[in-house]
Amino acid sequence: MSDALLDVISRGVTIYDLGRPMFKGMPQSSNHPQFSHSLPRRHGDMVRADGGSAANDLIVTGTHVGTHIDALAHVSHDGKLFDGSDARASGVGGRFMDLGVHTIAPMVRRGLLLDVASTLGLEVCPGGYEITPDDLDATVERQGVTPAVGDVLLVRSGWGRHFDEGSDAYAGTASGVPGVGEEGARWLVERGAVAVGADTIAFERLAPGGGHALLPAHRVLLVESGVYIIEAMSLDAIAAAGVYEFTFVLTPLNLVGATGSPVRPLAVVPNG
Amino acid sequence: MSDALLDVISRGVTIYDLGRPMFKGMPQSSNHPQFSHSLPRRHGDMVRADGGSAANDLIVTGTHVGTHIDALAHVSHDGKLFDGSDARASGVGGRFMDLGVHTIAPMVRRGLLLDVASTLGLEVCPGGYEITPDDLDATVERQGVTPAVGDVLLVRSGWGRHFDEGSDAYAGTASGVPGVGEEGARWLVERGAVAVGADTIAFERLAPGGGHALLPAHRVLLVESGVYIIEAMSLDAIAAAGVYEFTFVLTPLNLVGATGSPVRPLAVVPNG
Amino acid sequence: MSDALLDVISRGVTIYDLGRPMFKGMPQSSNHPQFSHSLPRRHGDMVRADGGSAANDLIVTGTHVGTHIDALAHVSHDGKLFDGSDARASGVGGRFMDLGVHTIAPMVRRGLLLDVASTLGLEVCPGGYEITPDDLDATVERQGVTPAVGDVLLVRSGWGRHFDEGSDAYAGTASGVPGVGEEGARWLVERGAVAVGADTIAFERLAPGGGHALLPAHRVLLVESGVYIIEAMSLDAIAAAGVYEFTFVLTPLNLVGATGSPVRPLAVVPNG
Amino acid sequence: MSDALLDVISRGVTIYDLGRPMFKGMPQSSNHPQFSHSLPRRHGDMVRADGGSAANDLIVTGTHVGTHIDALAHVSHDGKLFDGSDARASGVGGRFMDLGVHTIAPMVRRGLLLDVASTLGLEVCPGGYEITPDDLDATVERQGVTPAVGDVLLVRSGWGRHFDEGSDAYAGTASGVPGVGEEGARWLVERGAVAVGADTIAFERLAPGGGHALLPAHRVLLVESGVYIIEAMSLDAIAAAGVYEFTFVLTPLNLVGATGSPVRPLAVVPNG
């Protein structure tokens, strides 16, 4: 009665959590509403006749905070979205019905880690370093796994280790942040990626002191190519384990008309 | 270089979305902060020198709204949580570090649909109907799948069809809501469920006019047994397809110390 | 060294609070984000070395909830705001810099209560009753106070007593709500009012079952005349005291670019 | 028919706004939820049949941000509030019913500016400078106005000029902030102040690098004496005008059970 998928699952899988915890004060971009969590009700505030009590939460958050995915509605160029629609008109009504995050299908598909830092023999690529197509080619060669159409491609610069140092360090305002630039983004698109991700706050290379003034990789991916971007991922554990190929699982919240969603992506590999 | 899991995935899977869309005005309990979505920035509000523009979101929400999972910290009884800790003391600091939703491991495991409505020959169980152990036994027998320790068990009453009718109808304030009671909850616990779910707003049976005054199944599951509860699921599509057994995927947001999280659970089955 | 104003104040004044309390579950329009209050930090969550502890709050709210004032940016007609500007263009950037609530100067000026309900010999004007220019004329005559240019004019229908009955009753969805219509609004404008107020949720008459489909008085006041509107006021205490003329005090929050603000207006009268 | 208060008002008053504008990115303490403003609805999102359209707002904010008042419930010492009640127990239910900001009566009373900076011959008191009782005595003497029981006393250090430089400068994390210490607070209490205020983020002196580790003046005022504290005031305009004595107007939002409220205090003086 069981199925082939359950057969594999039943023999045991290892699940790598590629998401970051979400908590007050976590590193995030000041471009987006600050994540906040509060307990409107705590136990004992209101006790039912039978002795029961419930605590609950209030969450205030941007959608581009924590580990998150960018929907195609997030970025426009010269006033146009990916589908050629007028970007301003698409938002009338307060939500993006055509390219919002609710249009991203849940993902259970092949994912690849492209561990560029290790390929370069570095623990962390330096702030502002641009990951080139050559770096990506060398990584594929070293790892022995080849991207295929429909994959999710995750680029690791090692920058994720700065997450625990707070917003300034992780956002790299002064230092810049490593990542692909326009050419690296094209390389990923040409491999047929459905979505791409990285262990940094803005996925792409940020110049030292430059902030988010220019985001060419976002343009190439979201506007020109329809490829989703996943940011602020936790990629060190799969890198340490040498897990370069895996089943990638992603379920964005079904936020109708939103431009993104916090997510908790998984890399799943069968045991034994 | 591929693995057994990817082999199955690569031959194609069907993904059933067991979550509801989240939107302003969606049915939810008035016990929890209202879901709200706004676009602080729309395209054209701020255009970069290169012609790029980004839109973003502000989300305000309870965690027990939409399709969501209850962490063990959500409910206490006689002042105690599942681990025997003092419920009030556990919340000091404004978050539940021991039993918060961040302690729920992402799930990739066997799930079963228990389609009670169909077993009873009904489209929808009536408001206030208590699903009994006999109903559950009959459902297992009819479906020919047996729960095993570690499964996620999803109880379908058919009530999900009222979701589109708004909060009053779905919450069943006047009508009551069908679901398991204390005995049905024990039946689920005895099968070894790790988590349980339903297509209703509070998982368990609510008496007509009774509201949330008494929640015995919550006590049995969350406080006495350490079994998570998933509410407001969309179960009609898998029921219609006769998919009773599947790989269940759930990735709660990693909200440190929160009592729950909105989720988008999946049922995954291999094609062919 | 003292001044004439302080001389009066020092002899004693009576302060009437014309605002409503703000609390979770208070009556409000479902058109606006729900008011929510939570304590992110309670005493004991974090105690300083010296034994001190602080509790704090998180407020989520629309600005058109509770007793509040409408800025001119709130309403447009045929795409134009009061100053003739394009309403859509005025909001680009996510705030209304020209006609937002920050442009309303704090008010310390003459206010008049127009107690229409008492003039009509009613405790409460019926739902859907339109207060006419004749009603207003009769009220002025009965009360013996004449509006002057620059006054704040407060129209009392008696409907405020439904505030304590919850949103459905106070919003009058089924019953309609009494208030001025287009002609009454013109009467108020012609008297030279700087701002007008009422003890109802939308200031103007709402037809039974009609909701907010048509708001002609809003158009006359906000769009055609530049007169601010104050809603959901508490006017019963000044009516009971027969205080028809007073110093009206209003300090909207200085929310840059917002379309309104919750307020707590006062009527101040010298003692003796 | 008019009254003595209206007589004065009718001859003209000058209103000084002692509050700061509230906007995204304004300086605030990171101890409190970040102020955020968004437009869920803009003009054109939904146009009524008659050509009307409404824009509205969503505000998320702490209550101790912007110019604000601290209620007595805000601070406890050794587990007790001002009324001797158990601080933790007082917050059960998620609001402070006895000492919350809703218990602060709206104020129309005498206010005094104590311009310490000018007394000391300084534009701005240096970061970390403790304003002493001698400084306050010298200020009263220089200004020729004597505090009386029931006054609101506003202490000006000149630090308000740093408000426009952003959170780091204004909060004085590195530099410290000038203000009264424990002794200065007692001086204010002994004069019989009902409320006190300052042009700084935490009212009292903060040591360089010390943050909010110790807040003795808060203890003296809020816990020992029941005197409200108003923070982040704009005092430069009244200082420049030499307005040391005035009618002070304050209307906190009536937030039931909250520990504070954003406010917009006024100083009103008659013309001529």
Image: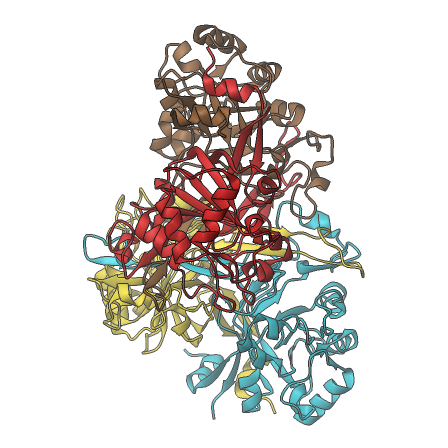
Chain colours: A yellow, B cyan, C red, D brown
Left or right: A135, with B151 as reference point: left
Left or right: C10, with B99 as reference point: left
Which of C22/C84 is in front?
A: C84
Q: Tell me the quarter of the picture where residue D256 sits.
A: top right
Which of A15/D98 is in front?
A: D98
Residue beneath the point at 58% across and 48% down: C118
Residue beneath the point at 41% across and 21% down: D270
- Number of marks in the image? 0
Left or right: A163, with A127 as reference point: right
Mark yes or no: residue D188 visible: yes
Horizontal and vertical percent for residue C28? 54, 56
Horizontal and vertical percent for residue D5? 49, 25
Which of D214/B191 is in front?
A: D214
Which of D94/A202 is in front?
A: D94
Horizontal and vertical percent for residue D47? 34, 65
In the image, residue A217 above or below residue A210: below
Q: Quadrant of the C terminus of chain C?
A: top right
Horizontal and vertical percent for residue B31? 63, 60
Mark yes or no: residue D199 visible: no
